[in-house]
Image (cartoon, rainbow, N blue to C red):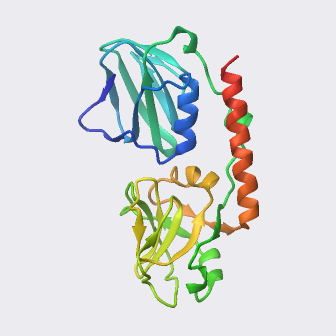
Amino acid sequence: MFELTKNSLAFAGGHSDDLSCQTCKILLGSPEEYQLAEIVYATEVFFKRHCMFTLGGAHYKDIRLNGVTIEQNRVYEAHGHDRLQFSGLERGFRLYLMAAAFAESQIACQRTAFEHYFSPPEDKIRLIKGPEFDYLKSPEDFLQSAFVISTNSDLAGLRLDGPQIMAQCYDISSSIVDDGLIQLTAHGPIVLLRERQVSGGYPRIFSVIKTDLDFLVQYPMGAVVHFQLISLEQAKVLLLQREAELKIFFQAMQR
């Protein structure tokens, strides 16, 4: 339905920020078939056929459809040969473009301010203890430190640059891993993302809670991140709250 220009950096079907992808899909009426791109850098998109689309995730200062400024988190109609242009990244890192077969009923559907449907992100990314939490010699050293998102990060994981975090050892028997788990290597921590491997051999010291992982992946490379430890019970409450907020948003889009 669309194609990015050659100088763009995007991943087909990527969804590191699951919340942005879910809201895009709801805005489009929850289609079974759609095209999705996780855009890290782009200046222009060409539409190849008649469709509807929406944009979520990272926020750009100016986005234009055939020269006319449009808003994010709103559904628009596009025709073959239409051009979508981006400039001035203001906030976030990953932009999501989702397109589906045209449906008149969805055009102009929009999501208002983020806080209208979802709780705003915290200043600190919240964590729960991982299976090898006890391997840490001083958990406080990690929680009191500031880390920088490394330029060596990729779709599989965010590498964190910062002070050396000491552990009893940096290798374990290969074990199952999940989205958001923080593995501690001898070269520093890695936050696993949704394109991760299925197992790993490094201590799993913490896990980013599900609701905050979507916020973390919007930190650009070079950004500073701080962490806060919460209980598993608190994490469950926050996840249930997120699910309730998504349900409210879905119901609002059905009216």
Q: Quadrant of the C terminus?
A: top right
Q: Is residue 174 left or right of residue 121?
A: left
Q: Residue at x 49, y 66 (%)?
A: 148
Indicate the position of residue 31 as horizontal and vertical percent values: 49, 24
Could you tell me how many numbered marks the image carries?
0
In this rendering, the answer to whether 49 lies above or below 20 is: above
In this rendering, the answer to whether 230 lies above or below 85 is: below
Q: Residue at x 50, y 61 (%)?
A: 178
Q: Residue at x 51, y 58 (%)?
A: 179
Q: Depth check: 242 or 138 in front?
A: 242
Q: Is residue 253 left or right of residue 33?
A: right
Q: Residue at x 42, y 33 (%)?
A: 87
Res. 36 in view:
yes
Outermost residue to the left: 6
Identify the image quadrant of residue 73: top right
Q: Quadrant of the N terminus?
A: top left
Indicate the position of residue 60 as horizontal and vertical percent values: 49, 35
Identify the image quadrant of residue 196: bottom left
Identify the image quadrant of residue 208: bottom right
Res. 59 in view:
no
Indicate the position of residue 187 as horizontal and vertical percent values: 40, 79
Indicate the position of residue 186 as horizontal and vertical percent values: 41, 82
